[in-house]
Amino acid sequence: MSHKKFETDAIRTQSERSQFSEHSVPLYLTSGFVFDDAEDMRASFAEEKQRDLYSRYSNPNVNEFVDKVCAMEGAEAGFAFASGMAAVFSTFATLLDAGDHVVSCSSVFGATHGLFTKYFPKWNIECSYFSINDVEAIEDLIQPNTKFIYAETPTNPGVDVLDMEALSAICKKHDLLLVIDNCFATPYLQNPIKFGADLVIHSATKLMDGQGRVLGGVTVGRADLIREIYLFSRLTGPAMSPFNAWVLSKSLETLAIRVEKHCENALKLAEYLQAHPKVKWVKYPFLKSHPKYDIAKKQMKLGGNIVAFEVEGGLDGGRTFLNAIKMCSLSANLGDTRTIVTHPASTTHAKVEPEVKAAAGITNGMVRVSVGLEHVDDIITDLEQALG
């Protein structure tokens, strides 16, 4: 592993140069790779040689992207996927057998919730949820067949924060794995492995790309676990495309400087909203009013780019606010250069059961803002007129 500074690793971790001595890493748009002779091919497939065989398994662009994320997260190994959800599903499917059980925070991304409730039950895999505010209840949920504890921190979309050291202590006591979705924080703000996580998952589609261009996912962590995830993914084929890996690897070169600005803008917006008479509450990890402010300060370098707040008037209030937005984008994505506003109760979580919504901290008037890189005065002006 590298011991250089974060920004240096992000920029200087590169695939080896070709015979053309290029400075910027080229695109390796190839499905396969060639071998010198029968023995070279045999030894390569027997994994006696470390090399690329086929782009469903590995590719120079994908390898570079994974190497960068491993350096950033302090991970032993990793594997990259076509999307964040491919990373989530493949990681779960590798670790879980029929009859197994998962303990998860109830505040998880809607698609992850769908895996737990719609698809895993048909393979006889069960999930028990604990509330963000009831970490003490976790131990009561653990069964003999529990494999791992899963959580996002900060959570989507409620921007709640979980104490990873506390989760890790429970996992060690009960011999469970700890799997953390670190997508909202990015490796620049937070490294779950330092707090005891065994595996860390990212949707690279979000702040890692940072410009709303490509899909991607990655899981990093313990080498023995990644080896199993790699073998599963070799067969099932959720591979990241070399083009997307090339784009994402270039994006990581500016991750630190971009995320710094995202966080600066987000904190200013959160402070503005907190003082607004038509806003009932604001949640942002680095506001002192956040219920887990102390834990956020312990785990995170800065507060991230997501701000959640409650407008007056419930569902209708949320819709009215969205309809009044002029500059900001109405989109389901997040972590873009462009500020994005969503109203979870009428969109992403419209079909989710009321009690599940409540457990995830989603109220009818809640708005989630993915704060972009426009001038913060212009972001505030747009939200101000929409609130008016």
Image: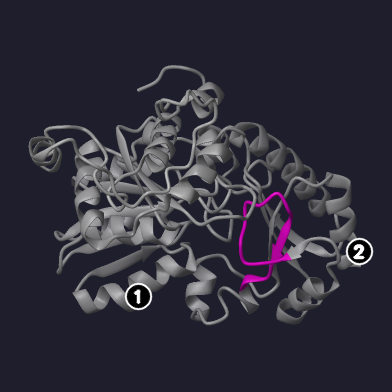
Classify 10 Å Cα crowding around label 1: few (below 14), some (14-19), many (20 and above).
some
Classify 10 Å Cα crowding around label 2: few (below 14), some (14-19), many (20 and above).
few
Mark 2 / mark 1, whichever is N-terminal: 1
In the rendered view, tell whether residue 77 sits above or below residue 266: above
Q: Taking the image as drawn, is residue 141 in sight?
A: no
Looking at numbered disc 2 in the image, what kind of residue is underneath it? Gln
**Residue wearing tag 1:** 117
Q: Quadrant of residue 318?
A: bottom right
Q: Which residues are magenta?
A: 330-344
Residue drawn at the location 75% of the way across and 63% of the way down: 329
Residue farthest toward the top in the current orientation of the protein: 3
Q: Nearer the viewer, residue 187 or 44?
A: 44
Q: How is the image coloured?
A: one colour
**Residue wearing tag 2:** 385
Q: Taking the image as drawn, is residue 193 in sight?
A: yes
Q: State the CA–CA distance, disc 2 to disc 1.
A: 40 Å
Q: Nearer the viewer, residue 322 or 356?
A: 322
The answer to whether 133 appears left or right of 62 in the picture is: right
Q: Position of residue 266 (x, y in %)?
A: 73, 46
Split into 4 quadrants, where in the image is the C terminus?
Answer: bottom right
Q: Nearer the viewer, residue 182 or 316?
A: 182
In the rendered view, tell whether residue 369 sits above or below residue 377: below
Looking at numbered disc 1 in the image, what kind of residue is underneath it? Thr
Q: Position of residue 86 (x, y in %)?
A: 38, 60
The answer to whether 318 appears left or right of 198 in the picture is: right
Q: Position of residue 306 (x, y in %)?
A: 65, 52
